[in-house]
Amino acid sequence: MDALEKNGAHVVHEVRDEFDPIFDAFRRDIPPYSWLDFVKFMITIPLLPLRVANALFWVFACYFSYLTFGPRLTKQKKRHSKAVAANDAAQQQTTRANATDALGTGDTASERAAQPSNSTSNSVELVPAYRQKILTFCGRFCARMMLLSFGFVRVAYVDEPGYDYEEAKHYTVCSNHVSMIDILVFMSYNMPSFVAKESVSHIPLVGRIATAAQSLYVDRLSSGAGNVTEKIIQRQRALAELQDDKTPVAPLLIFPEGTTENGKCLIPFRSGAFVAGYPVSVYILKYPYSKLSPSYDTINGGWLILRLLTEMYNSVEIHRFKPYYPSEAEKKDAKLYAKKAAAYFADKGGLGLSEGSFPDKLEYFAIVRGTKLPAWVIPREQKS
């Protein structure tokens, strides 16, 4: 690859061909925009203000329902000295030993915990079970109404023979990650908590909802990823030990790929969801389409949202499979578990397996958009 350094970023000139197999999970086969599509677009333009207003209304409705019935949030300032952090790491050495690269950052949880941190986080007070049920109902209903704003008239459930929701609800919900719409789809399904970027907690309205829903946050550039892994383990343990619906434990959703793909291939799973060795519930999202797929994030985000808002009809299918139970060897090796789980997901969903990664995705975007590659991304061909 030929690349030049300019203003702190790689400027891509002669790059790998966009049809390189490493980009299979990110390649978008976008059908040409025909005159009929243009006519449909013009017909739906008058609906755009109504759809935008509808989406905003239900965002505010969800926000106020969580403000009314949700838990109180108290901000806590975290200051850890090296000595305190090292002591904490020593106490939890066994748990963290398996957390190496659990979130794809490349360092061990113990090493991350031994670094000083100074951050602000939200402490969530759990609510009684009856209020949790109200929040779940309100969240699911509001999310379904928001999906309608994007033209998702049909949300179908396709179950594998033998699938049992009562069995699956005890385990972490794991799914392929196709689009930003995935979040709304799962909110309308069971209003789970998410493992999300730390910046999500600061988004107006959305941050309050996500935090009150017991979501877990991770900052890829921070030193606290090990703590997030431990929180995932604690949540998985609580779900596995759940005996009835009176305990207000929110389902946990993880997209183990860590980024979106095109819905045709899976990229290697990160091991964060598999460190504890608990089974995972298997879900595959599919978006039947003829012209526009929500996975088209190679195009401008604003244009994609506009296209979705002006689509007459969209649909999504939630394919639910029996939980995946790891072997004894997989329980002891999170990376092996993640690899075997990815193969299982691909087999069940009829998807391909790619060796692509998040940096490869950014490189592919730089190729098709003709833009700069972030300075921290080292192209695969330049890695030693």
Image (cartoon, helix red, strand yellow):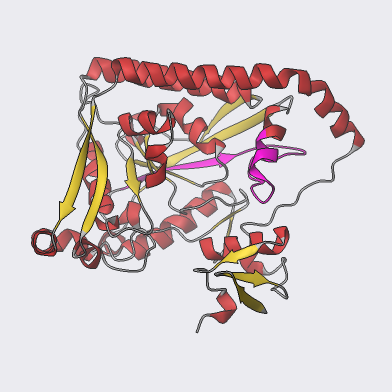
Q: Residue at x 52, y 59 (%)?
A: 267
Residue 88 belongs to the span the image colors magenta: no
- Residue span colored magenta: 279-305
Quarter-wise, where is residue 55 in the image?
A: top right
Position of 331 compared to 209: left or right? left
From the viewer's perspective, tell me whether residue 163 is left or right of residue 36. left
**Residue 362 in view, yes or no:** yes
From the top left corner, tell me how far across and down residue 333 is, in percent: 29, 65
**Is 37 placed left or right of 195 in the picture?**
right
Query: Looking at this view, is 7 or 130 the one in front?
Result: 7
Q: Is 297 part of what is drawn in magenta?
A: yes
Q: Is residue 9 above or below residue 66?
A: below
At 44% from the left and 58% from the top, the residue drawn is 269
Residue 357 shows up from this direction: no
Place residue 18 in its image quadrant. Answer: bottom right
In the drawing, does residue 14 fall left or right of residue 278?
Answer: right
User: How many labels were placed on the picture?
Assistant: 0
In percent of width and height, residue 42 lies at: 83, 25
The foreground one among 42 and 331 is 42
Q: Which quadrant would residue 165 be assigned to in this image? A: top left
x then y, percent, for residue 228: 28, 50
Q: Nearer the viewer, residue 334 or 252?
A: 252
Query: Which residue extends farthest bottom?
Result: 384
Q: Position of residue 106 (x, y in %)?
A: 36, 68
